Image (cartoon, rainbow, N blue to C red):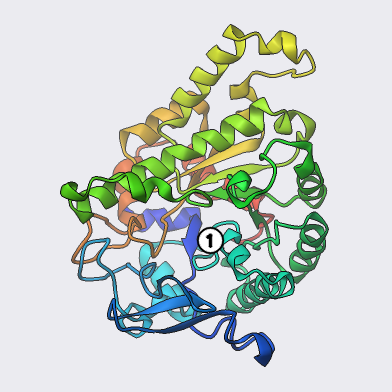
Amino acid sequence: MLTPAEVDQYRVIDTDTHVVEPYDLWTSRLPARWRDQAPHVKWDDNYQEDAWYFGTERIGPAASAAQAGWREYPPDHPPRLADVDAATWEPKARLARMDAYGVWAQVLYPNVAGFGAGKLLTLGDSDLMLACVRAYNDFLVEYASADPRRFIPIMALPMWDMELCEKEIVRAASAGHRGVIMTGEPTFWGLPPIAESYWDRLWALCQEMELPVNFHIGSGDMSIFDHASPSAGPHANYAGFGVQFGLANAKVIANLITGGVCHRFPCTKFVSVESGVGWIPFALEHLDWQWLNCGVQHEHPEYDLLPSEYFKRQMYGCFWFERGSVRSAIDQLGPDCILYESDFPHPTSMAPGPATAAVEPREYIAAELGDLAPGVLRKILHDNAAALYGAELLGSE
């Protein structure tokens, strides 16, 4: 049985973390003429908290993503970034916290602009939108420069314009980004469905440049909040939101496979982020059954694999809190398509504190996975992510 101290030998790569954006991320990088329209923070008297604004439109609380260690249960959250643990936003403090938790490296995701940059469309000005994407990507490279071995930046995309997408992918990758984050629901933003040939240029370029495409939950339609029952209470409703968002990524997986994207781009890698893995075996078994039962093999004789086989060849899921379900997923899928994450410092993250059920990653891994074979642990904790994000030498000194 693995002890917590022995977890460190695996050089754990945490495949879903978030850098809480500093208040001046955009205002310090964009021309002065855009500073009133660009994402910025100001105090909201109505809510008694700092909030992000795009122009005059309030987007959301400025420190709600920085929940790690906070004293209140979500959806209650810190009113200001000054009130939170510095490890949620400052790179040196983050590295120290990673050491304390037994995490060697982290993949870095955004908050403010959305998990696919879709929120930037509300700005309306195409030049400003592009400038905001580029400013964010540049910021993340600067952040990662604190230790490029241990920070893995994932680029935002100007997904509303394919030519701009292609240019930004090349630019950001040359600066050090190791993957892209893409909305799984482009139709919500007025763009073609994810499996339409319109997106083939994106998948082709990512395949050519060996950049994984990451689909983080909550990247499109957020109307799930509108269907909650007020009488249930904010904490019960918030608990339900997380489950529903995670399972929603089944749509992304199904659409990519049934739409032939995996068939057309067999070397493009796709990651379902912050969605868990326990449900994936059922979803794939269900999809295999429907595939055969609905005659897909006759409609598309060119498809040479079953959905579960496409998934195992080029897709991944990420887990963080699961117990029996992750072990079942490993047994059914094998360890090659499973990644570990902590979701630090979001409300559901594996970050101990006075208002959470979480334990630190090192303790969780030892307690829940410590009896797995060393080769299996090495794959799901390090090797899969290292190969996926082009970081095979991350663990070397």
| Crowdedness near tag 1: few (<14), some (14–19) or many (≥20) residues, C-alpha within 10 Å | many
Q: Is residue 23 visible?
A: yes
Query: Is residue 198 toward the left or the right of residue 98 in the image?
Result: right
Indicate whether 395 appears above or below 213: below
Pick the front one: 77 or 305? 77
User: Between residues 91 and 78, which one lies in front from this camera angle?
Assistant: 78
Q: Is residue 351 left or right of residue 170?
A: left
Q: Position of residue 351 (x, y in %)?
A: 32, 62
Tell me which residue sits at (36%, 56%) in the image. Answer: 361
**Dividing the image into 4 quarters, which one contains the C terminus?**
bottom right
Q: Quarter of the image holding residue 247?
A: top left
* Identity of the residue drawn at 57% across and 67% down: 151
> Residue 108's quadrant in the figure?
bottom right
Q: How many numbered marks are there?
A: 1
x, y percentage for residue 250?
Answer: 50, 34
- Residue at which label 1 appears: 114
Between residue 289 and residue 322, name the one nearer to us.
289
